[in-house]
């Protein structure tokens, strides 16, 4: 391979790897900081270009061995980096990566077919540039369409339904095998036959229909996730109704007893025992303060959730400390506060009950600049495993917290230390 060929190959590989990185980044739900994520994809880019150039020098840029090693090696590396960089469940990441691989194969085949038909007389270098340009132009509407229409659905669906995700991943994997076969067939130079073009178009049409069904399944999972959140809100509202009934019963009792208190005070005043009457009034005021519900912060929904949780913990003998300064008005929706706080507090409460610990359950909510920081810690049973700041085993409740936090470009991180589990949720409000 000459120096000129090396330059041309490097230029096309840079364009291609940048396209890959942009597409993978669009599907990525960041696990790490922006800087670390960029570093990971930068390493992938260097590996991609380095491997392609190395095998091209060894076996020639147009050989089948070069194509196979480059495609396989870079695909495996891309999958590893995507799995490492994204915070989604593995089953969900597998489906997304397989779907992207299929899209790449389809665009690769279309680029070969179009260039063979429109530019049959191009040199090897010209063909390389032409195919790369066609692929890039095809990617632009695909990425924009995904970001605008599909990504909101995909982001909102948790990875808890692993069986469903693996099922649609298996269907996608079968199509990937078919499209890889088309890539091999067309790359080998059989793209001029009309039968090949017709068969390829038919398979793309079938896959598009199946993809429509698959995203319908994803939309159904999204609806189920919303229904679970609505159910959680209904539970919260039911609890608030019970609390309101309890307050009403307390108010009736106070009104009923108020006449007796007035009679006692009047009797003391009639006897001229003013000091005793004042002392009685002070004692009565103290009893009213003790019966008054605790107020933790000005925000009505947050205060109601914390109050209900505080009363429940006291009834069950769980030691709890609550502190909050959430203002009356925040950009965070009430439903999202319910999703985050109800699940965190429920998990913390259950953690205390399961381990039988007499340690304290602590809840601290602070408004810092344009952020709301929620920290919840509780004693926990042994055996919990933290991976990359998240619990290895997590249920629908934690997934709901993650999904609600993502609405505000937030972050959630767990930490386990000395038998105490702490979780920190940051919302960019």
Image: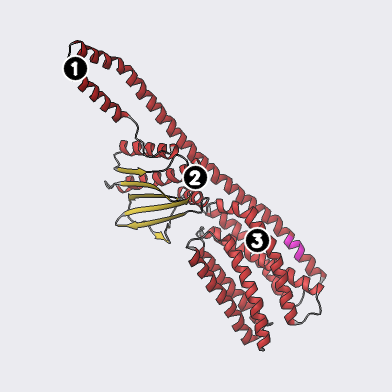
Q: Is residue 382 above or below residue 250?
A: below
> Mark 3 falls on what kind of element?
helix
Q: Which residue is mark 3?
A: 143
Q: In the image, is 171 to the left or to the right of 264?
A: right
Q: Check if mark 1's residue and mark 3's residue have beta carbons within 8 Å.
A: no
Q: Looking at the image, is mark 1 or mark 2 earlier in the sequence?
A: 1
- Crowding at mark 1 (Cα within 10 Å: few <14, some 14-19, many 20+): few
Q: Check if mark 1's residue and mark 2's residue have beta carbons within 8 Å.
A: no
Say if the magenta span includes residue 202. Answer: yes
- Give the residues drawn in magenta, as a range: 200-204
What's the distance in space between the residues labelled 1 and 3, CA to CA?
82 Å
Q: Check if mark 2's residue and mark 3's residue have beta carbons within 8 Å.
A: no
Q: Which residue is mark 1?
A: 274
- Crowding at mark 2 (Cα within 10 Å: few <14, some 14-19, many 20+): some
- Quadrant for residue 163, please give it: bottom right
Q: Looking at the image, is mark 1 or mark 3 earlier in the sequence?
A: 3
| Residue visible at 34% across and 44% down in the picture | 323
Q: Is residue 49 above or below residue 239?
A: below
Residue 315 place in picture, x, y as percent: 31, 35
Q: In the image, is 292 to the left or to the right of 398?
A: left
Q: Who is closer to the viewer here, 322 or 271? A: 271
> Mark 2 falls on what kind of element?
loop
Q: Which residue is mark 2?
A: 332
């Amino acid at each position: 391979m000459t120096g000129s060929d090396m330059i041309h190959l490097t230029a096309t590989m840079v364009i291609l790897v940048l396209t890959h990185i942009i597409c993978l980044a669009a599907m990525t739900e960041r696990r790490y900081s922006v800087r670390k994520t960029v570093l990971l994809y930068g390493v992938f880019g260097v590996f991609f270009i380095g491997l392609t150039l190395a095998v091209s020098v060894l076996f020639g840029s147009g050989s089948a061995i070069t194509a196979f090693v480059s495609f396989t090696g870079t695909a495996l590396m891309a999958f590893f980096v995507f799995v490492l960089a994204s915070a989604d469940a593995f089953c969900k990441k597998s489906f997304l990566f397989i779907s992207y691989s299929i899209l790449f194969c389809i665009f690769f085949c279309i680029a070969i077919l179009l260039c063979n038909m429109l530019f049959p007389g191009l040199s090897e270098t010209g063909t390389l540039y032409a195919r790369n340009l066609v692929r890039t132009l095809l990617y632009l509407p695909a990425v924009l369409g995904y970001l605008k229409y599909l990504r909101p659905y995909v982001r909102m669906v948790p990875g808890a339904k692993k069986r469903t995700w693996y099922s649609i991943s298996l269907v996608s994997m079968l199509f990937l095998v078919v499209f890889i076969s088309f890539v091999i067939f067309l790359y080998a130079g059989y793209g001029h036959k009309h039968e090949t073009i017709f068969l390829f178009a038919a398979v793309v049409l079938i896959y598009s229909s199946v993809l429509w069904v698959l995203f319908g399944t994803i939309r159904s999972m999204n609806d189920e996730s919303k229904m679970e959140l609505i159910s959680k809100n209904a539970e919260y509202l039911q609890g608030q109704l019970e609390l309101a009934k309890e307050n009403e019963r307390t108010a009736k009792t106070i009104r009923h007893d108020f006449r007796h208190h007035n009679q006692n005070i009047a009797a003391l005043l009639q006897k001229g025992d003013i000091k005793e009457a004042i002392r009685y009034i002070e004692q009565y005021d103290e009893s009213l303060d003790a019966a008054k519900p605790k107020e933790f912060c000005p925000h009505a929904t947050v205060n109601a959730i914390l109050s209900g949780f505080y009363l429940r913990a006291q009834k069950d003998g769980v030691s709890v400390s609550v502190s909050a300064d959430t203002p009356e008005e925040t950009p965070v929706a009430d439903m999202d506060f319910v999703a985050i706080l109800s699940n965190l507090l429920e998990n913390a409460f259950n953690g205390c009950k399961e381990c039988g610990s007499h340690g304290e359950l602590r809840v601290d909510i602070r408004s810092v600049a344009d952020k709301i920081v929620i920290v919840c810690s509780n004693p926990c049973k042994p055996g919990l495993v933290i991976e990359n700041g998240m619990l290895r085993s997590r249920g629908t409740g934690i997934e709901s917290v993650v999904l609600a936090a993502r609405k505000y470009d937030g972050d959630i991180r767990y930490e386990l230390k000395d038998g105490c589990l702490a979780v920190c949720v940051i919302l960019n409000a």
